[in-house]
Amino acid sequence: MKIAILFGGSSYEHEISIVSAITMKKVLKKSTLVYLFVDKDRDFYLVDSEAMKSKHFSSGDYKKDKKLTLKKGGFFAEGMFGSKEVAFDIVLNLIHGRDGEDGKIASLMEFYEVPFISPRIEASALSYNKLYTKFLAESLGVEVVPYEHLSKNGKRSITLDYPVIVKPVRLGSSIGVTIVREKEALDYALDVAFEFDNDVVVEPFLDGVKEYNQAGCKTDVWELSIVEEPQKEEFLDFEKKYLDFSRDSKVMEATIDDLLREKIRESFKKIYDPLFLGSVMRCDFFVLEDKVLLNEINPIPGSMANYLFEDFEDMIWRLAKNLPKEKKIMIDYSYIHSIQSAKGKA
């Protein structure tokens, strides 16, 4: 299968997306890979596989690559003798953060009828916004970490007990996130978060909580990863998560009982189906006093969470053959014709 890796984007997580794309070279070994880069100006470029090194992008050398145009059916390189289509079977959306996870790419792919693996428009909009994610989970009967929502021009007080964690609503990779241990430090944490977003969520910093990650997708059957208990540190900052996005080796499965594993998986399934069909996503859960709480949805996880699956590449192939289809709407102008006939202008 020929897979087009779409990466970059106008996003605070632009560089992380490059790291994820480079990692795919080591992960998708049986596939033929095509690299489609979106720069900060949202121009598309076709990048040669041999040039897939971080310096190629940081130096600006990518601007010497073929510039692409998105048209119906795919991406095209313009030349003296017309346009030539870039051949691939499926696009794998690896743009983290804005553009890739907020629905822009999903909208473009659907509008131009390009087959793609990624959350669709509604799923992107809900999972990109941490506040909407909580609304979604609660509506599905999945418990969430308690929270309060603050806006940039609103009040700067909370009722939660300290310590708390302040998060920009529309960012990942721990960007703009601060742990606040006392009331006097809240203003500074909000100033940091509001540099990146106009809205934040404030959550209790839970002590003694266990964290577990579950990834998966649905092809013709459920394809769920192992449940991972990630490296336990008080807080994973941007640099630690940046390195985490380059993972390509398998991790150990969490040592938990079957009942807890099933609770985590059932919560994942409730969130995934049907909204996230066509994507590989990861959910991060907290377990506190036997309660499974959704912490975050990662709609396009770093390196696609490949390290959690036994047969990641084959799963991608299966998913590519089981994508949701947008309903075709028949337009035959019967309404206009009927009006014209009634007026004697048929």
Image (cartoon, grey):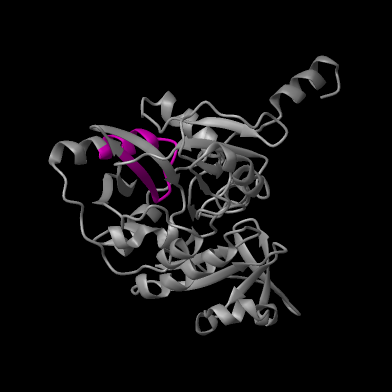
**Horizontal arrangement in the rendering, residue 161 relative to residue 176 (left or right):** left
The quadrant of the image that shows the C terminus is top right
**Residue 242 to residue 196: above or below:** below
At a point 43% along the width and 42% down the height, the residue shown is 296
Q: Residue furthest left?
A: 257
Q: Is residue 342 left or right of residue 141?
A: right
Between 86 and 50, the residue placed more toward the observer is 50
Camera sees residue 141: yes
Name the residue nearer the viewer: 274 or 136.
136
Is 286 situated left or right of 199 in this image? Answer: left
Q: Determine if the magenta segment contains residue 276.
A: yes
Which of the two residues, 216 or 148, is positioned nearer the viewer here?
Answer: 148
Residue at the spot 43% in from the left edge and 55% down from the top edge: 301
Q: Is residue 196 left or right of residue 280?
A: right
Furthest residue in direction bottom, as rendered: 50
Q: How many numbered marks have been drawn onto this rendered protein structure?
A: 0
- The residue nearer to you, when weighing 323 against 270, is 270
Does residue 327 show up? Answer: no
Q: Position of residue 36 (x, y in %)?
A: 57, 68
Q: Is residue 302 magenta?
A: no
Residue 51, position as x, y percentages in the image: 54, 83
The N terminus is located in which quarter? Answer: bottom left
Residue at figure coordinates x 70%, y 65% from the top left:
43
Percent position of residue 182, x then y? 51, 39
In which quarter of the view is residue 175 placed?
bottom right
Q: Check the image and report above or below for 169 versus 175.
A: above
* Image: 86 above or below 13: below
Residue 258: x and y in percent read 13, 40
The range drawn in magenta is 264-286
